[in-house]
C-alpha cells in the first residue's frame, strides 16, 4: 500500500479523485451562484451566502477544499514534469498528426494554469474581501430568513458591483470556457484513472462529462454576463 | 492514377546511441505504387550501397504485420499515414508523386536510439519478464470445456492478446507512457481463469517495472489507441488501473 501514491497509476488516482472532489465543489458553487439571478435585490443570495459562511460543515470543508486544490495543482505539476522527461529531449520533426485525439486532453496543464490564474483573481475579488479585509459594500443588511429577520453581510452588493466592470466579466467568460474545456477531458478521464471505466461506460462518461463541463463552465460565465447586462442598478 | 512515384525522403541518421543525429535527404525515382514502404526502403538502401554510401538502418522482420519488429515514425504518425497497420503493411499508394516523406525513429526516453531508425525496445521485454506470464505446471491437455470461460471475456482477452509489442503506443504518446502495452499484457491474462490466479502480483510487478524504466504517466489522451496497429482499446488501461489499485488495496 505504501508505494501506491508514488506509482504512476497512484499519481493518476490522486489527480482523478481530487478532480472529482473539485467538480463536486463546482456544483455547489454554481448552485449558490444561480441564486444571483433571483430578482429580489439579492436577498435570497445573501441568505444563502450567510448560510455558507456560518454553517459548521462548510467551515470544516473549506480547508479540505483548499487542500484539494493544492494537491490537484502540485500533482499536475509533478506529472507534467515527469511526462516531459519520459518523452525525451528529441521532438518529432514531422510533428504529431494523430487524428481523433482531443485538444483538451493534450493541453490539460495549460488549461489548468488558465484556471489557476483566474482562481487567484477570483479569490482577490471575493474571498479576500469577504473573509479577510472586508469591504464597504459588504455592510450588513437585514434579510428575512425563514420568517426571522437576520443581519447578514451584503455579499450580493459586492458581487453585483464586481460584475459591473466589463473586463472582469470578460475574464470570467474566458475562464468559464477554459474550465469547460478542462472538464470535457477531466470528467471521463477521472473515472478512467480510478479504474471505473470500460468500452460502454467510457462513452457514457464522455457524453455526461461533456454536458456537465459545458453546463458548469458556461453556467458560471452566463451568470457573470447576466449580472453585467440586466442586474446593474 | 500514376503507377510510379518520384519522392524525396528525409531520414533520421544517427551513428550510435550517444552520437548526435541529423536528417539526411535522399531522392528516389520510379517507385511503384504497388511496392510496400519497406520495399521502398530496400530500394533506397540498394541505391545507397551502389553509390558506396552507408545504408539506412531500420528494424523489420516478418513483413506481414504480426511480429512487431518494424517501427518508423512516418510523416507525423507511428506506422505512417494509414490506420490499424504496421509499417511493413504500409504501401506506397498512400503517398503522392513528388511528396517529401519524413522518417524518424520512435522518440521516447524509454526507447533510446541504437542507430538511425532502430530504437532499443528491450524495456518491453523487461516489463514482460516482471510478470507477463502464467507460472503453472501445464501437465496434460485438459478437456476444452473443463473450465468454462464467458464468450465476452474470451473475446476481450484475445483482443488484448493481439498486441505485438511494437511500441507505437509509446511513440504516439505525448507522455512517453507504456500503459497501453502493459494494460494489454495484464488484461489478456487477467480475463482468463488461468491468469486470474496471479493477476494481483502481475499487475503490481509490471507497473513497478514500467515506472522504473522511465516511461511516463498516462493522461488518457487516447493517442495510443488511435495509432495502435492492432486497435488495442484503452478500456484495457482502465482495467489495468482497476487491477493495480485492487491489488494495492489488498496489501
Image (tube, rainbow, N blue to C red):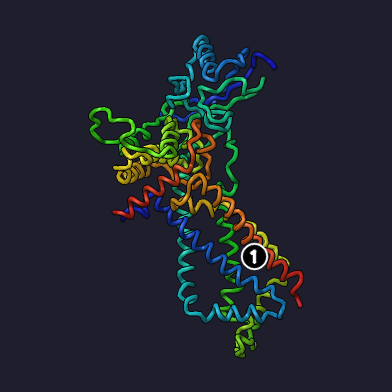
Q: Residue at x 50, y 46 (%)?
A: B220
Coordinates of residue B135 in the picture (x, y in percent): 26, 36
Q: Nearer the viewer, residue A126 or B149?
A: B149
- The reply, left or right, for residue B53 in relation to residue A121 is left
Outermost residue, bottom direction? Answer: A149
Q: Residue at x 71, y 71 (%)?
A: A227
Q: Badge 1: few (under 14), some or many (20 or more) residues near its Cα, within 10 Å?
A: many
- The reply, left or right, for residue B89 in relation to residue B120 is right
Residue B198, by quadrant, is top left
- The reply, left or right, for residue A145 in relation to residue B56 is right
Coordinates of residue B23 in the picture (x, y in percent): 54, 27
Q: Is residue A79 above or below residue B62?
A: below
Q: Nearer the viewer, residue B62 or B72?
A: B62
Coordinates of residue B235 in the picture (x, y in percent): 47, 43
Quadrant for the N terminus of chain B, please. Answer: top right
Q: Residue at x 40, y 45 (%)?
A: B240
Amino acid at each position: 500500500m505504501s508505494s501506491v501514491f508514488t506509482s504512476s497509476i497512484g499519481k493518476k488516482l490522486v489527480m482523478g479523485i481530487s478532480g472529482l472532489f473539485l467538480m463536486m465543489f463546482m456544483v455547489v458553487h454554481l448552485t449558490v451562484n444561480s441564486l444571483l439571478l433571483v430578482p429580489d435585490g439579492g436577498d435570497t443570495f445573501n441568505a444563502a451566502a450567510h448560510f455558507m459562511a456560518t454553517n459548521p460543515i462548510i467551515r470544516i470543508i473549506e480547508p479540505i477544499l483548499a487542500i484539494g486544490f493544492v494537491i490537484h495543482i502540485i500533482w499536475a505539476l509533478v506529472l507534467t514534469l515527469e511526462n516531459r522527461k519520459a518523452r525525451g529531449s528529441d521532438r518529432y520533426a514531422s510533428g504529431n498528426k494523430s487524428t481523433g485525439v482531443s485538444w483538451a486532453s493534450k493541453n490539460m496543464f495549460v488549461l489548468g494554469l488558465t484556471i489557476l490564474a483566474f482562481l487567484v483573481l477570483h479569490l482577490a475579488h471575493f474571498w479576500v474581501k469577504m473573509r479577510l479585509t472586508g469591504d464597504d459594500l459588504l455592510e450588513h443588511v437585514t434579510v428575512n430568513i425563514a420568517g426571522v429577520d437576520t443581519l447578514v453581510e451584503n455579499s450580493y452588493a459586492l458581487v453585483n458591483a464586481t460584475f459591473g466592470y466589463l473586463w472582469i466579466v470578460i475574464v470570467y467568460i474566458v475562464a468559464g470556457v477554459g474550465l469547460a474545456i478542462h472538464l470535457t477531458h477531466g470528467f471521463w478521464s477521472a473515472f478512467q484513472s480510478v479504474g471505473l471505466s470500460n468500452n460502454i461506460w467510457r462513452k457514457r462518461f464522455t457524453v455526461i462529462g461533456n454536458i456537465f463541463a459545458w453546463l458548469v463552465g458556461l453556467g458560471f460565465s452566463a451568470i457573470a454576463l447576466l449580472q453585467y447586462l440586466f442586474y446593474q442598478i | 492514377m500514376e503507377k510510379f512515384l518520384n519522392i524525396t525522403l528525409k531520414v533520421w541518421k544517427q551513428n550510435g546511441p550517444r552520437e548526435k543525429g541529423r536528417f539526411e535527404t535522399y531522392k528516389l525515382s520510379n517507385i511503384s505504387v504497388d511496392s510496400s514502404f519497406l520495399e521502398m526502403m530496400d530500394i533506397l538502401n540498394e541505391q545507397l550501397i551502389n553509390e558506396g554510401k552507408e545504408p539506412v538502418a531500420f528494424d523489420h522482420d516478418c513483413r506481414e504485420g504480426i511480429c512487431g519488429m518494424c517501427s518508423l515514425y512516418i510523416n507525423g504518425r507511428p506506422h505512417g499515414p494509414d490506420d490499424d497497420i504496421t509499417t511493413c503493411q504500409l504501401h506506397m499508394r498512400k503517398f503522392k508523386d513528388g511528396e517529401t516523406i519524413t522518417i524518424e525513429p520512435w522518440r521516447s526516453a524509454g526507447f533510446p536510439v541504437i542507430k538511425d531508425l532502430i530504437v532499443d525496445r528491450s524495456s518491453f521485454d523487461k516489463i514482460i519478464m516482471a510478470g507477463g506470464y502464467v507460472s503453472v505446471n501445464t501437465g496434460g491437455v485438459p478437456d476444452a470445456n473443463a473450465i468454462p470461460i464467458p464468450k465476452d471475456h474470451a473475446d476481450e482477452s484475445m483482443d488484448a492478446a493481439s498486441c505485438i509489442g511494437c511500441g507505437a503506443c509509446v511513440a504516439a504518446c505525448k507522455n512517453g507512457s507504456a500503459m497501453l502495452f502493459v494494460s494489454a499484457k495484464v488484461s489478456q491474462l487477467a480475463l482468463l481463469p488461468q491468469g486470474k490466479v496471479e493477476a494481483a502480483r502481475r499487475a503490481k510487478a509490471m507497473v513497478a517495472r514500467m515506472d522504473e524504466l522511465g516511461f511516463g504517466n498516462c493522461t488518457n489522451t487516447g493517442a495510443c489507441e488511435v495509432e495502435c496497429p492492432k486497435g488495442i482499446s484503452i478500456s484495457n488501461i482502465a482495467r489495468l488501473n482497476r487491477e493495480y489499485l485492487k491489488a494495492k488495496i489488498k496489501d
